[in-house]
Amino acid sequence: MTIFDIFFFNVFSYYKARFKKQANTIAVLYISTLQIALVFLLGSFFAVFLSQMNVNTMSSSKAWTLFIIASIFIYFKNWIQYGGKKRKVLNAKTSKNKSKLYPIWLLWLLPIASIGLSIIILQAL
């Protein structure tokens, strides 16, 4: 199991008690947001790094288009991965292992901090 699986099931188990039917949707939205924020962080880092090295690889509009396509792909990948039989199998594995539970505020702080750090890095452009 990856760290994203552990984060997914922490969010899923937290919201399962409060919102029974929407818990999976909230958890998929969370894990997609986290992964998209990390892609944004990596992209902004490489954009600034390559800009400082005076390397022109692609234009800004093409980079944003690539980011949007990657974001859509990440969301649908997570929707398929955590939406059915595989989620039930992974849920059985996590209930057996009793993985560490993280506080929900810390889990929601991860994508927010990642986006904030990306914006700070992009200020160097």
Image (cartoon, grey):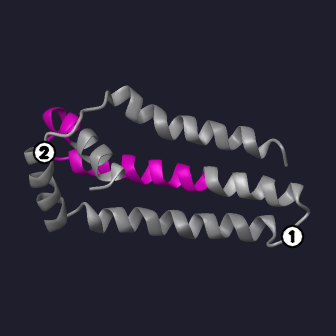
Nearest the viewer among 27 and 95 is 95
**Residue shown at 66% from the left, 57% from the top:** 43
Q: Which residues are magenta?
A: 13-40
Other-residue count near label 2 (Cα within 10 Å), few / some / many at <14 / 14–19 / ≥20: few
Nearest the viewer among 110 and 96 is 96
Could you say where residue 77 lies in the image, as x and y percent from the top left?
37, 68
Residue 81 appears in which quarter of the rendering?
A: bottom left
| Image quarter of the N terminus | bottom left
Residue 104 appears in which quarter of the rendering?
A: top left
Could you say where residue 45 lies in the image, as x and y percent from the top left?
71, 52
Left or right of 87? Residue 80 is: right
Nearest the viewer among 85 and 46 is 46
Q: Secondary structure at mark 1?
A: loop
**Residue shown at 38% from the left, 67% from the top:** 76
Judging by the rendered image, the residue that carries numbered circle 2 is 97
Judging by the rendered image, the residue that carries numbered circle 1 is 56
